[in-house]
Image: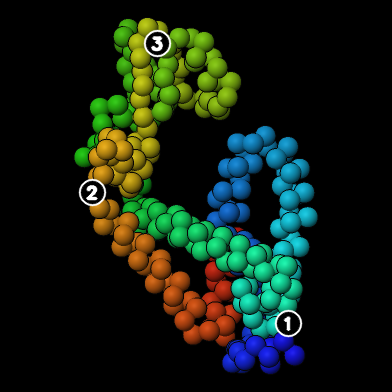
Amino acid sequence: GFIMESGLPPREQWSSWADFIMSCIGYAIGLGNVWRFPYLCYQNGGGAFLVPYVISLVFCGAPLFILETSWGQLLSIGGLGMFKICPIFKGVGIAAAVMAFWLNIYYIVVLSWAMCYLWNSIRLDSNVPWRSCDNPWNTPRCRSEYDPLPCANNRTIAKYFNVKVLTSDHLNEYRKQFFVGPKVNWTVCTAVDLSVQSPVKEYWNHKVLGISSGIEVPGGMRWDLALFLFIAWAICYLCIFKGVKWTGKVVYLTASFPYIM
């Protein structure tokens, strides 16, 4: 047979079919579904985006997923080796490995961001660091919903973040696109450039990412993010270093966690 001729050592088997199914669920459900898919769907037409998505899923994504998992289980070989059974498909295995390599690199960074926010949100009260503008990283342009922005004639706009208000037309257009709560005091500020930013955005740009003033300024090392990135990679290693029997138990948590969140 193909396995005997390849000279590969025997591999571990899944403890049960449930371990394998949960591993497949964990492989299929991740950041792309929980975080990126809703954003892409919203940015590209809402329901209309589902048409090309379903077509791509039915004719490309699902067949490749089923082919990879079924051949992998039959031959007990990884993605690079199993396509040798049909040399014309050898490039498919290489492409899948390269794609998984790059996805892991930048998805793990997103996980480190999430861990950073999770750590900084563990507080006994509601005073999270991105709630107000009274922090060292905030700029004079920062305005929170608890700190209304005064206009030239002493009127206020209670909520108007990360945009510019110049005329009443701008304000009316903004109100059409976004929900306006009943407690918001909307007043038109004319002939004044009200370019303001929310404390949430400033926390993200200045505290978490530490974005510099330009591409010519490299900025400093984000040691806190480096620590969270190391922890994320360490968790990944601990989940797989003992083989599929250990991984099969870990996926019960990792596969169900996105649904719980």
The coloring applied to the image is: rainbow
Q: Is residue 161 left or right of residue 39?
A: left
Q: Is residue 57 left or right of residue 150?
A: right
Residue 208 in the image, given as x and y percentages of width and height: 33, 47
Q: Amino acid at mark 2?
A: Gly
Q: Secondary structure at mark 2?
A: loop
Residue at the outermost front position: 87
Residue 156 in the image, given as x and y percentages of width and height: 37, 16
- Determine if residue 163 is in view: yes
Which quadrant is home to the C terminus?
A: bottom right
Estimate how packed mark 2 is, as few (under 14), some (14 to 19) or many (20 or more) residues with alpha carbons within 10 Å.
few
Residue 131 in the image, given as x and y percentages of width and height: 35, 40
Residue 133, image quadrant: top left
Residue located beneath label 1 in the image: 74
Q: Amino acid at mark 1?
A: Leu
The residue positioned 26% from the left and 31% from the top of the image is: 139
Residue located beneath label 3 in the image: 189
Estimate how packed mark 3 is, as few (under 14), some (14 to 19) or many (20 or more) residues with alpha carbons within 10 Å.
many
